[in-house]
Amino acid sequence: MKEVYSEELMVLSSIQLFGADPNYIKPELFGTGFILNHRENFYFISVFHNIKYRDLAIYLETNLPPENGTVPLIPIGGFMYFDLLKVAEDANASELVAELEKGGERIDITFAKLDKLPELLQPEMNFTFMKIEKGGKVYLKSESITEPNKSETYGFYGKIKHEYDGVYLKMTPTLKNNLTYHNKSDKFYRFKAPKLIQSKEEYEGCSGAPILDSNGGLVGVACKIKTKTKLVYGFSIKECLRLLNISIDSNQI
């Protein structure tokens, strides 16, 4: 079996996500996600801000050959998401009901169960230090989930600078590697990029990508950056898994 290095796994496991009007499928929202094998099922994981626009349908990039002059996309729905409710431990029933009705801060993570694995291809790509061969996208396993630490390096892959040239959509692949773990803030891990982040365009489109360590361990979901710093934020994959398990055990997904 061919050995897959962590940088290659970052590329192979990241899946381009599009948001588009279902009546006129021209992508206008761009993000990333990945497939997780957990408890004998497959789930597509991303961040909530990639799917929050209710008038847009969500599609996955397939990289399959064009059909009738259009590029095949796979629709995906049934996303679960959570509100963060701020309820005191000694709250009474009426206070809890009031909080539920009001709703809380939306947790920036989402997932959907897949009835079957979609056919998603990975085109051949050349980076300065490695070559990605043409083949299929891969899924990650929940057994690979781990905690970040300061002795590893981290990274993720996505596509940025989405723009149309006539009817053609141009995208720039980017591999954000050599990140180092900084600390944890609530449900987020903070990583440091090798150099100062000058603008959001350097990362915009990568939200939802799996953050992997140098051994291929899954630690988080890329969700935001802070410009004029080196800070990259990842939602804790262990917290994501906890929410996923709640959804499974309560028959919500």
Image: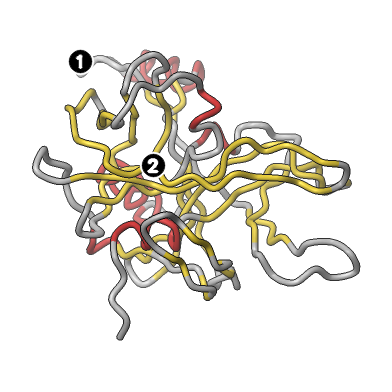
Q: Residue 39: x and y, percent?
A: 32, 67
Q: Is residue 54 left or right of residue 203?
A: right
Q: Residue 165: x and y, percent?
A: 82, 41
**Would you place residue 63 above or below residue 26 in this image?**
below
Element at label 1: loop
**Would you place residue 182 above or below residue 244 in this image?**
above
- Closer to us: 202 or 184: 202
* Residue at position x 33%, y 16% in the image: 229
Element at label 2: strand
* Residue at position x 63%, y 52% in the image: 77
**Would you place residue 14 above or below residue 120 in this image?**
above
- Residue type indicated by callout 1: Asp
Q: Which residue is mark 1?
A: 90
State the separation of the CA atoms marked 2 and 1.
44 Å
- Residue type indicated by callout 2: Lys
* Residue at position x 28%, y 39% in the image: 236
Q: Quadrant of the N terminus?
A: bottom left
Number of other residues with Cα within 10 Å of mark 2, as a class: few under 14, some 14 to 19, many 20 or more:
some
User: Can you name the residue that lies furthest to the left here?
Assistant: 151
Q: Quadrant of residue 142?
A: bottom left
* Residue at position x 44%, y 15% in the image: 98
**Would you place residue 109 above or below residue 184 in this image?**
below
- Residue 176 tag number: 2
Q: Quadrant of residue 121?
A: bottom right
Q: Quadrant of residue 148?
A: top left
- Closer to us: 115 or 230: 230
- Closer to us: 81 or 16: 16
**Mark earlier in primary sequence (2, 1):** 1
